[in-house]
Image (spheres, rainbow, N blue to C red):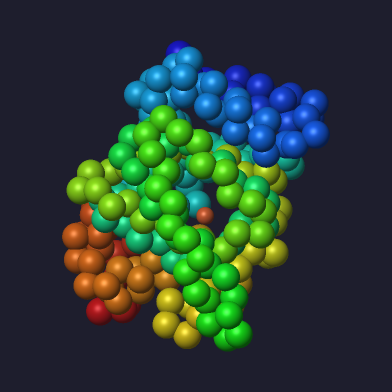
Amino acid sequence: MFSIDVFAARCKTAMAAADNRQAAAAQVLADAIATHGPEAIIEGLNAAVPPGASVGELIVHASPELTMLFARIPARFQSGIHNHTVFACIGQLKGQEVNTTYAKDGERLTVVERQMAELGTVLQLPADVVHGIANPGDETAFALHLYGGDFGAIQDERSLWDEDSHAELGFSFPALVQQSVKAMKKSDNNAGLTALVQAIPAAKAAVDALA
Ligand SMILES: [Fe+2]
């Protein structure tokens, strides 16, 4: 059985003993997927997060050195552009996650590359990454995201970028949902908006506000 607490303890022990904390965390995540199988991990994470939970409530573990987030990504979802300020490891458990990274080009952001997080693999992102994610599929995608710090403690250091102007904004989970809605409206992604409200009813206000 997959235990969030056991995983977190194992991950922190491995990071503390390693020169490269991110590589150590990625290895623990890859080992867990290989040992338990994606389905058992999804089951363990689903049990910890009630249906309808908003994005900030998908955090299943937070400590000074590690945040674990259950990325339960609605069909066709597109996220706003954001950073983390700490490293990230994405362990894909079901479906796919398209990861688009950006670079600053004067006042604008330009796309650097798109990578696909594939089932059973672990994608590593550096601490300075500016990115957005999307679920290209017609079903909910699941991933376990690890971050090399405490999201609660670093929230004020994080940024979000406006979809239209690319102006840098302060990060908050509600603001991330707002920019995600904006991204989906901009690309006429009604399927993504519908799936978002179905998965996270609290997001309806952000969808209606931008109608
Ligand atoms: Fe992210």
What residue is at 60 percent from the left and 68 percent from the top? 159
Question: Which of 88/72 is in front?
Answer: 88
Left or right? Give the position of 158 relative to 188: right
Question: Which of 16/68 is in front?
Answer: 16
> Residue 116, how many percent across, how many down?
40, 48
What residue is at 20 percent from the left and 48 percent from the top? 138
> Residue 157, how many percent across, how many down?
70, 64
Indicate the quadrant containing the C terminus: top left, top right, bottom left or bottom right: bottom left
User: Height in image: 66 above or below 172?
Assistant: above
Left or right? Give the position of 49 relative to 129: left
**Does any portion of residue 199 appear in the rendered image?**
no
What residue is at 42 percent from the left and 43 percent from the top? 117
User: Height in image: 116 above or below 61?
Assistant: below
User: Height in image: 41 above or below 86?
Assistant: above
> Residue 103, how many percent across, how many down?
57, 70
Q: Residue furthest front?
A: 113
**Does any portion of residue 146 appear in the rendered image?**
yes
> Residue 113, how many percent across, how many down?
47, 61
Indicate the quadrant containing the N terminus: top left, top right, bottom left or bottom right: top left
What residue is at 66 percent from the left and 35 percent from the top? 23
User: Height in image: 68 above or below 208?
Assistant: above
Question: Which of 11/6 is in front?
Answer: 11
Question: Which of 211/201 is in front?
Answer: 211
Q: How many marks?
A: 0
